[in-house]
Image (cartoon, helix red, strand yellow):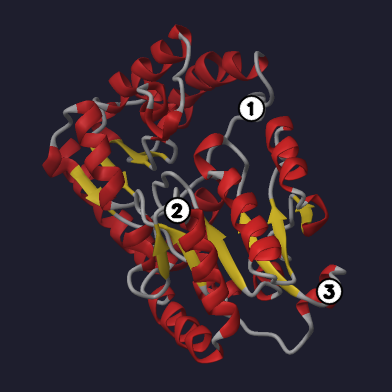
Amino acid sequence: MSVYGDLLLAALRSFLPPGDEAIGFLPRHVFLGPRPARYWAQYIGYQLSAPFAQGDVNHVIDHAYGHLLYTLDPARTVVTFHDAIGLKARDGHFGHSGGDRSLSLVQRYNLSGLRKAAAVICDSEASRKDFLAYTGYRSEQVEVIPPGADGSFFRQSNSDPKGLLGLVPGRYLLHVGHTRFYKNIPALFHVLAILTQSLGYDVKLLKVGEAFTAEQEKLADDLGIRDRIVHLGMVADDLLPDVYRSADLLLFPSWYEGFGLPVLEAMASGVPVVASNRGSLPEVVGDAGVLVDPEDHETMAKSVAMILDDAGFREKLRQAGLERARLFTWEKTAKQTLEVYRKVYQASQ
């Protein structure tokens, strides 16, 4: 969310005409830290503060804060709906058992707030479809505006990215993101096991993001691949382009994504992509990468092997990915978002 908010705000400021201003707002006294303090801050503190920072148009950049529509002027408020992951999990998708009743009530509270918005922006057609299915919102008031790829990912460097990151030479599969259930982390481990133990490849998994869960750690041990995993943890934004360039490909087997920004960042970095064929990922990847059923570990492993073995195919994917990524820019995102703001402003007068 911070990437989306910061880069959208910067892009808006780069071309707004004189007299127009885009202001970011996050109250200093609201601590969005671990539960239970987070719940008080998110649903009470933030909600009480928001009305004092209203503009001619308000933009709630995360649909998890749909409850702010109870205190903001809904006729002047736009919300970005990124994905329906929480809602689908509650309903038992992805093999998930669903949340408890209190979580369900929170989700309903957010959804009822979202229905009040003057306009809704979705990252993808997949997100738009899910949003309409769960809310019954006015379809004509929903715009699909994808995020962009930051320019830093397109800039090539003559330096050795592995050396900068302290990585030993070798082949690396990359995964960027957290480790919650819908990221399908077990598929990463199974693919790595197939490649190294059945197909004989000397390859490692380079992981960026939060720590693995205890269950995921156990699976890595059970599969005998623990020594094949290099976990970088949380990486600073200015180092992330080097992380992508150090990898041979991005492996992204999510059960569902509302967009899938790491896929776009990889393509912008000239890194081939093997991704799930679920959710929004086919929209982002197009024909510039390899899309595979996230349950089919064997096919995913063979797709990775093909990219590692075939330099011509690897270069074809690299070029196609670069061309595809250039279609997604923050300038385009910001200009389309500004048009939504203008429509909302005019309708509120």
Residue 17 in sight from this viewpoint: no
Labelled disc at residue 296: 2
Of residue 96 and residue 85, the one placed in the foreground of this image is 96
The nearer-to-camera label among 1 and 3 is 3
Give 11 or 239, whichever is nearer the viewer. Answer: 239
Local secondary structure at mark 1: loop
Q: Earlier in the sequence, mark 2 or mark 1?
A: 1
Contact check, label 2 and label 3, Cβ < 8 Å: no
Count neighbours of disc 1 (C-alpha within 10 A) and say few if under 14, some if 14 to 19, many if 20 or more.
some
Foreground pick, 83 / 187: 187
- Residue 308 in view here: yes
Along the viewing direction, whichever of 306 and 214 lies nearer the viewer = 306
Q: Which residue is situated farthest in the top direction here? A: 101
Residue 142 position, x and y percent, is 21, 44
Q: Quadrant of residue 284?
A: bottom left
Q: Which kind of residue does numbered mark 2 sit on?
A: Asp
Number of residues whose C-alpha sits closer than 10 Å to that of mark 2, classed few (under 14), some (14–19) or many (20 or more): some
